[in-house]
Amino acid sequence: MNESLLTVREKSIIAGLYLSKFDADGLRHLGFDNFKEAFNVIGLALGVPPASIKNYRDEFDPLFPNSRQGWHKRTTREYCKTIYNDLKDCDMHTLSKILKQSLYKNPEIDLLIEQATETDYYNKDSSFAKRLVTGQAAEKYFINQFPKMENFIGYTMEDTTTLGCGFDFKLSAHTENFLAIEVKGINELHGTISLTQKEHSIAKILGERYYLFVVRNFKDSPFYELYNNPLSSDLSFSKTERKITQTTWSATL
């Protein structure tokens, strides 16, 4: 299966298959606390309603030994059955890798980083769920909300997430200087967000032209808050400095 050629529907079906087959163990393996969180995060990362992921899980429930009945009163749809036949015998590690490859924006790099930073099996800081919430799911949430936001009427949007410029989206209008949007996401209603040194510096330089878009409560019902000029807003940022021990490996030639 070539994950780079999968349609959004096929990726959604794979997510549903995984969640049905591996149930609570599958949730923990990916770093999710409950199904609602998984539906929200995966759905938003794909740009589909979270209910779509739930429906595909329910589609497969009659085919796997779990406590749910799912859509047991109807025949499995053919396009779902095709993916089921291809992947039904995969173990958790294999199917989770296929799911990650289908969802990560840069799967080769993201999987490599995940592997390099993983310290234990259920490490929340390097988990699939954590990486999607703090990246793709929150960013896709902004993309979906952008056309409806009164603050940005008349602006066009440019994705700058891969440029390392201290913000995620550049908004431009013909008669105005550009605006910068930095996106953050947290699982809970309340939590901590952090700015890197570069993000903080750019926010300070741009002032009123810098916005912080924070998506909260992925675990239940996500919503956003928008902070203009965040360094001068109600948010209170405290500086944290850490001394890092860096390990290097040397060879004599």
Image: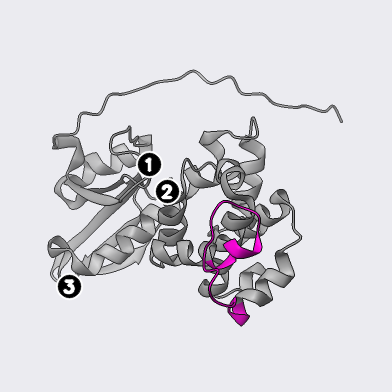
Q: Is residue 177 visible?
A: yes
Distance between mark 2 and mark 1 Cα atoms: 8 Å
Q: Are marks 2 and 1 in contact (CB under 8 Å)?
A: yes
Residue at point 56%, 61% (across, down): 15
User: Furthest-bottom residue in view?
Assistant: 78
| Residue on which disc 3 sits | 174
Amino acid carrying label 2: it is Glu
Q: Which is more N-terminal, label 2 or label 3?
A: 2
Side of 190 where 44 appears, left or right: right
Disc 3 crowd rating (10 Å Cα; few below 14, some 14-19, many 20+) is: few
- Whether residue 52 appears in magenta in the rendering, the answer is no
Amino acid carrying label 3: it is His
Q: Which disc is residue 187 wearing?
A: 1
Q: Which disc is residue 74 wearing?
A: none
Residue 60, image quadrant? bottom right
Q: Secondary structure at mark 2?
A: helix
| Residue on which disc 2 sits | 37
Range of magenta residues: 59-79
Relative to 231, residue 129 above or below:
below
User: Furthest-right residue in view?
Assistant: 253
Q: Nearer the viewer, residue 14 or 201?
A: 14
Q: Secondary structure at mark 3?
A: loop
Q: Which is more N-terminal, label 1 or label 2?
A: 2
Where does the image place residue 17, in percent across and percent down from the top left? 60, 62
